[in-house]
Amino acid sequence: MGEHIVESKFDEEERKAFVQHLIEDIRALELMMMDGLIEDDIQRIGAEQEMCLINREYRPAPLSLDVIRDINDPHFTTELASYNLEANLDPVKLGGNCFSTVEKQLNALLEKAKTHAAKHGAKVLLTGILPTISKDELGMDFMTPIPRYYRINDVLKAWRGDDFTLRIKGVDELSLHHDSVLFEACNTSFQLHLQVRPDDFIKSYNWAQAIAGPVLGASCNSPLLLGKELWKETRIALFQQSLDTRKWTNAVKEQVARVFFGERWQEESVVQIFKEDISTHRIVLTKPIEKNSLEILKEGNIPKLEALNLFNSTVYRWNRPCYGVGNGKPHLRIENRYIPSGPSITDQMANFAFWVGLMLGRPKKFDNIPTIMDFREAKLNFIKSAMNGRQTVFTWLGMPITLKKLVLGELLPIAYKGLKKANIDDGDIQNLLGIVETRVRLGTGAEWQIRNYRELRKQMKQDSALVQLTKAMYANQKTNKPVHEWSSIKEIAKKKESFKWVGQIMSTRLMKLYEDDFANLAISIMQWNNIHHLPVENTKGELVGLLTWSHIEKLGQIDTNGARVSDIMIKNVITVQPKTEIPMAKKIMKEHQIGCLPVCVDSNVVGIISKVDL
């Protein structure tokens, strides 16, 4: 690794030089394409594995820098959040037992990560979104302290000119403002790379777009975020919204998001895709670059196109075109960025084989996709698939078809042919594609999570259910069985857990009153619902008082006719925070002789804790 790395200054001068390098990189790529310098006689596959670090309580463990330092292996890199790691696998030549080779290395790297994480009291989990991530772990103090990450955050925030806004609707709805790009860090994926010949790049790229919806639908594994049941692959909505710098205006105007599927079929060459991205996205990161790529080319050497690659790493197409240099030869790849981590390594390898098989087995009629399929059809298929997973009904070549029918009837046979054509071992083909087939018949990781989470919620509060779910995922993952063979959590007894904070045991489904509500209605609501304590808010949603049954009884026969809630509520309310320790809350209630405590973040009520909860 011993390269001399010069720290980026991110100043005006560096930016000016970077822009020039970017323009020259595009020109250099055009020249290499024209001169036939791009490798076209070999195909390779590669992958990147993102993972979560969790502590003994199955919550995020912000230890990535310590663990990476201990691992001391260049295959590992940091991620935006300090509780995530990434392992970069070596490229492997396509053919024979290439998938077994990838799986073997993946297992070895994960073993390494697990061993070193264990020294710090942490475990490694593969999952699209870690169920136990809470709002607490999405603040700046959980960002990996590396200048590049702070820079991305600062620039995107400045462009947005406002907090980021998150709104995702599924069975539940999640709406909130947040002040950093760290929500992006909830997403962990298994990114797949396939080397593609330059002369076939556009046909391959368009086909990759066409199959994205069904491939995603068969591999969903991220149905929960902050305890809410959202999309089957919530990462798709979350990633787009967490890096969205577009300003909301009164005018309707076309703006391309930084995380996006694409706007149309591609027509010319890979260079055109890069040009389009540079034309529609501002430069987030820069770095000092020593040598001009055109000069390197003139000297008969192959340039790394550093400016283009850095720029490309901050534009998040779900299917991303990539340029790289391996063994001194330049090549082009398509990177599939939409597949989630988990549920098991076996499942991930099955997804990998399914995608690669489909890419290689592209039927002739799809060579010119724009003539047989509308781009919006492919794009809508992708979004619907992220929302509905295995239950999606697609439009395929103008006709409606279920995911099950499309995958089993059309796509799996194409994938079989593609892998056969590449001389992949028969045993691997049968095994890996067989897993996809069974999963499409029986259920994805997302469905396993939802089914078990709903079961747990009947027995326990949200926080405990999320912990138990994560614990079960960890236990099942260790067996390395595919998710359709995972055992369910039904057997969990209602055992008492060691709770530490108020946030773990508070009631979150709250009825609230407003200070200008009529008192007689408020009293009736309390009687009808057998509620003893109700928080009172003002029009800004801030806590201004508390209505309690004992306080109303103390007031005696008040004339509620015409009286408002503000006339009869307790105005000096004692509150606690979600991270208040439970013994402390007990002590406060005892000292003040009160039966409940509103739980607040700033001046907003997020829960209430009563003697019953304790």
Image (spheres, rainbow, N blue to C red):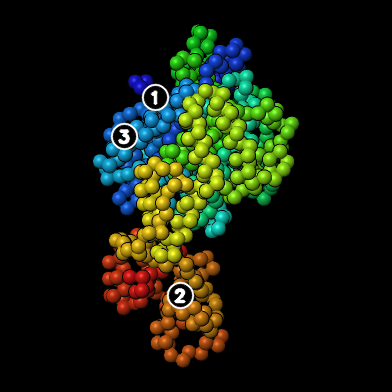
Nearer to the camera, 419 or 563? 419
Which residue lies most toward the left here?
119
* Residue under the image location 48 percent in, 56 percent down: 451
Amino acid type, label 3: Lys
Q: Quadrant of the N terminus?
A: top left
Q: Is residue 108 left or right of residue 547?
A: left
* Residue under the image location 35 percent in, 32 percent down: 109
Q: Is residue 311 left or right of residue 414?
A: left
204 over 168 or under it: above or below: above
Q: Horizontal and vertical percent for residue 610?
A: 37, 73
Q: Horizontal and vertical percent for residue 319?
A: 57, 33
Q: Nearer the viewer, mark 3 or mark 1?
A: 3
316 over 446 or under it: above or below: above
* Residue under the image location 45 percent in, 60 percent down: 455
Q: Between disc 2 and disc 1, whose residue precedes?
A: 1
Is residue 179 at least partly visible in the picture?
Answer: yes
Q: Which mark is residue 521?
A: none
Nearer to the camera, 407 or 138? 407
Q: Between disc 3 and disc 1, whose residue precedes?
A: 1
Q: Horizontal and vertical percent for residue 499?
A: 31, 61
Q: Secondary structure at mark 3?
A: helix
Q: Nearer the viewer, mark 2 or mark 1?
A: 2
Q: Secondary structure at mark 2?
A: strand
Nearer to the camera, 283 or 258? 258
Amino acid type, label 1: Val
Q: Which mark is residue 112?
A: 3
Q: Which mark is residue 6?
A: 1
Is residue 333 at least partly visible in the picture?
Answer: no
Q: Which mark is residue 534?
A: 2
Amino acid type, label 2: Leu
- C-alpha distance separating marks 2 and 1: 59 Å
